[in-house]
């Protein structure tokens, strides 16, 4: 039997050194309204999804890896990649590739202010 779930990625955790700064950055880049959540054992900010049981993730205060090393998280862009790239630059992130087109959509590799590899994806 072959394992074939609806969503292979279940949850993503992005470590950041300053949660409030990261909330500001991700809010600006993705046009979302992340808020600090203190209800669990550690503060975090959960990415909003239309389906609460769908694949999601959160930011948490932790130790990011070496800049650009480690896994890359692909996050859905709210509009054209070109607009989001301007927001990345204005919010203190770094663009590290050209826009790549594939049959499923377009994406670009970026680094957040903590050096996490985050790709912006647009369908």
Image: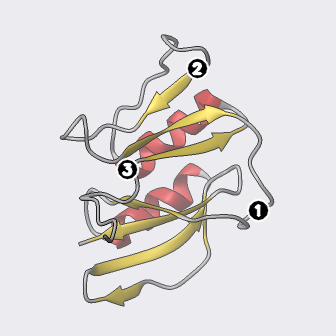
Q: Which mark is residue 67?
A: 1
Mark 2 surroundings within 10 Å by alpha-carbon count, few (fewer than 14), some (14 through 19), many (20 or more): few
Q: Secondary structure at mark 2?
A: loop
Residue farthest to the right? 66
Q: Spatial distance from mark 1 to mark 3, Cα to Cα?
A: 21 Å
Query: Which residue lies under the disc numbered 2?
Result: 43
Asked where in the image residue 43 lies, by quadrant, the reply is top right
Where 51 falls versus 116 (above or below)? above
Dot 2 or dot 1: first in sequence order is 2
Q: Quadrant of residue 35?
A: top left
On the image, the x and y values in percent for residue 57 come to 44, 42
State the SS at label 3: helix
Does 28 sit above or below residue 21?
Answer: below
Q: Nearer the viewer, mark 2 or mark 3?
A: 2
Of 111 and 42, the residue lying toward us? 42
Disc 2 and disc 3 in contact, CB within 8 angstroms? no
The residue sitting at 61% across, 18% down in the picture is 42
């Amino acid at each position: 039997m072959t394992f074939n779930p609806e969503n292979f990625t279940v949850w993503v955790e992005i470590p950041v050194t300053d949660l409030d700064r990261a909330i500001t950055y991700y809010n600006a880049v993705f046009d979302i309204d992340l808020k600090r959540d203190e209800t669990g054992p550690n503060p975090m900010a959960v990415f909003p999804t239309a389906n609460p049981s769908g694949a999601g993730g959160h930011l948490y205060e932790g130790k990011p890896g070496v800049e650009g090393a480690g896994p890359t998280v692909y996050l859905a862009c709210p509009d054209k990649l070109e607009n989001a790239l301007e927001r990345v630059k204005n919010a203190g992130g770094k663009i590290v590739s050209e826009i790549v087109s594939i049959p499923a959509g377009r994406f670009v590799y970026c680094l957040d202010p903590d050096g996490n590899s985050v790709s912006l994806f647009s369908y």
